Amino acid sequence: MRSRRFEYERRRARKRRRNRRIRSFFIILLVLVLLGGAGWFALKQLDLTGQQSSAYTDDYPGPGTGQVEVTIDIGATGTSIGETLVEAGVVKSTEAFNRAFAANKAAPSIRPGTYRLKKQMSASDAIAALLDEKNRSENTVTVTPGQTTWQIVERITSVTSFTADEVNAALKDTTAIGLPEEAGGNVEGWLAPGSYEVSSSDTPTTLLSQMIKRTIGELDALGVPKDQRELILNKASILEREVNIDEYLPKVARVIENRLNNPDAETMGYLQMDSSVLYGVGKTGGVPSADDMADDNPYNTYLHKGLPPTPIAQPSEAAIKAVLKPADGPWLYYVTVNLETGETLFAQTLAEQEANTARFREYCTANPGKC
């Protein structure tokens, strides 16, 4: 009995010692884990502190002082904008600007142009200022469908620092501006409608090149063969000046085709377009006077058969598409009978046209000064 009790006590003692070792192991393990976590947290805090210190040292606290003008060029990236601002003394470093740029979801929408900013701004304040249109100077040349080259020259000189002589000199250097050979040396019709932001590096040559390049791209996209481009632009420019409601464009395009392709019809191959007559005497709107109609110049399509020698304006894409796909119909005539609404009537015979024209005269009588 004593031996069995002794053996039992020995087993219990061994079990207590084993349990103490297991508990000690887990306690030591827990301590190590806690110490490791504390160390990791401390290192993380040191890292964050270092980052904050770095952000502070490579960025101005703001809000900035004084004023400086900075030009953001077309196609500028966040990094290139940052470099421009650093050079101008607006922000302290490109690193700080890039961080602020990445943190602001609206930053990629910063527009090209010239901005009035302060010096020594914080990067985030600089981003906010660039997104505020109040700080941006208007420096956009807008070409609208139907404008003539001389109207575009006036617009360019009114918005930019370029002189009329500089722009006209660029127009004459057709190779430098990329005017295709099929244009015959005349840019009329090739200056694509649209808005063009003028950057600090632009010249009249680069600006005009953008317009011509856009026209070429548009014609390519529409599948217009090179040897047909000038012809298409010529017809489309007449449409643009004759029609102010797009729904009539395909019908007027058909009238042009019917007159050109049927020299034995009542119109005998004459286009008889008021828009070309006005262009020939240097006008851009209104109704031709008796003197205008009598002026013998190549653009007077009442006196000369066929198309005028060049386009007479910059056509829209809608006008070009109408020329490429005119409506089906026998019309030889049309007349706009209401200059306010643009209502236009079409006719196959001269008698029908005269009746429609009478309606236009009635409109003019009822609306003095509008015709």
Image (tube, rainbow, N blue to C red):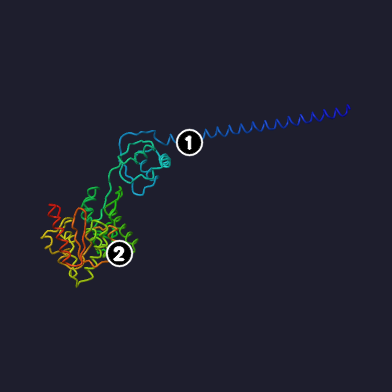
Q: Nearer the viewer, residue 14 or 222?
A: 222
Closer mark to the observer between disc 2 and disc 1: 2
Left or right: where 30 falls relative to 73: right
Residue to which mark 1 is pinned: 51
Category of crowding for the residue at label 1, using alpha-carbon neighbours closer than 10 angstroms: few (below 14), some (14–19), many (at least 20): few
Q: Quarter of the image containing the N terminus?
A: top right
Left or right: where 113 falls relative to 48: left
Could you tell me which secondary element the residue under label 2 belongs to? loop
Q: Looking at numbered disc 2 in the image, what kind of residue is underneath it?
A: Lys
Where is residue 157 shown, x and y percent of the image? 22, 50
Q: Looking at numbered disc 1 in the image, what kind of residue is underneath it?
A: Gln
Q: Nearer the viewer, residue 207 or 330?
A: 330
Where is residue 283 shown, x and y percent of the image? 16, 56
Total marks shown come to: 2
**Residue 29 seen from this side:** yes
Q: Which mark is residue 225?
A: none
Rounded to the nearest angstrom, the CA distance separating label 2 from label 1 is 63 Å
**In the image, is residue 13 above or below residue 331?**
above
Residue to which mark 2 is pinned: 325
Q: State the residue at coordinates (36%, 39%).
A: 128
State the residue lying farthest toward the left: 291
Could you tell me which secondary element the residue under label 1 belongs to? helix
Q: State the residue at coordinates (19%, 71%).
A: 265
Category of crowding for the residue at label 2, using alpha-carbon neighbours closer than 10 angstroms: few (below 14), some (14–19), many (at least 20): some
Q: State the residue at coordinates (30%, 37%).
A: 67
**In the image, is residue 277 above or below residue 88?**
below
